[in-house]
């Protein structure tokens, strides 16, 4: 498999949850620098963390897709510029220091944000991920910027306990996806 195929494969795994593809393109020592805002299972090394991250993203965004705009490969590094597209149909739960930071109720809006990812490869598989994402555009599309209608709904969700419930459901699903991946590694 080429470096370009491994890079594209990583994002196919996030969009689809394909465990077999995850085993083929994700190194057992994989780390994701961006996992700090996601459920704890997303920080696990290897395919388990990637599969958990996919569950987390797909819980918030249906029809998740990562169309590639540009891809450059040099040695053991791949730079990939792409869009993240989907529809916000589930809670988008974000964490800080392992604790629930924000649960954004579903808005039903289409999202489309640009991202640049730096991937490092080892043994033909992705071993490290870093990203620069246009979160300002994403938050604007979700109505989170000042004056956005979603801000009031976030406060209501937190006060009612719905945010904590949503976070628990999504973290549990991410953990189950990671556990299934770890069982396959044995």
Image: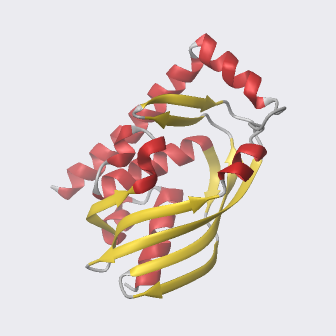
Residue 4 seen in render: yes
Quadrant (top left/top right/bottom left/bottom right) for the N terminus: bottom left
Asked which quadrant contains residue 152, the reply is top right
Residue furthest to the left = 186
Residue 69: where, in percent of width, then height?
A: 66, 77
Image height of 151 relative to 11, above or below: above
Q: Is residue 11 left or right of residue 24?
A: right
Residue 127: where, in percent of width, then height?
A: 32, 68
Asked which quadrant contains residue 184, the reply is bottom left
Q: Residue at x 64, y 70 (%)?
A: 67
Residue furthest to the right = 147
Q: Is residue 37 left or right of residue 42?
A: right
Residue 150: where, in percent of width, then height?
A: 76, 30
Residue 177 seen in render: no
Q: Residue at x 28, y 54 (%)?
A: 45
Q: Is residue 139 left or right of residue 3?
A: right
Image height of 114 relative to 107, above or below: below
Quadrant (top left/top right/bottom left/bottom right) for the C terminus: bottom left
Residue 167: where, in percent of width, then height?
A: 49, 28
Q: Residue at x 47, y 82 (%)?
A: 4
Total marks in image = 0
Image height of 114 relative to 109, above or below: below
């Amino acid at each position: 498999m080429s470096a370009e195929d491994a890079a594209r494969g990583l994002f196919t795994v996030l969009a689809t949850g394909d465990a077999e593809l995850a085993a083929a393109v994700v190194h057992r020592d994989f780390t994701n620098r961006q996992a700090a805002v996601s459920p704890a299972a997303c920080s696990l090394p290897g395919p388990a963390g990637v599969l958990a991250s996919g569950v987390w993203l797909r819980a918030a965004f249906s029809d998740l897709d990562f169309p590639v705009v540009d891809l450059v490969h040099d040695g053991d590094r791949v730079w990939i510029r792409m869009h993240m597209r989907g529809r916000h149909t589930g809670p988008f739960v974000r964490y800080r220091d392992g604790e629930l930071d924000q649960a954004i109720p579903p808005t039903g809006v289409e999202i489309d944000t640009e991202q640049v990812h730096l991937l490092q490869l080892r043994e033909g598989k992705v071993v490290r991920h870093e990203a620069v994402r246009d979160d300002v555009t994403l938050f604007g599309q979700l109505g989170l910027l000042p004056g956005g209608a979603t801000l009031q709904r976030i406060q209501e969700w937190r006060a009612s306990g719905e945010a904590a419930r949503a976070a628990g459901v999504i973290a549990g699903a991410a953990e189950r996806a990671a556990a299934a991946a770890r069982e396959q590694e044995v």
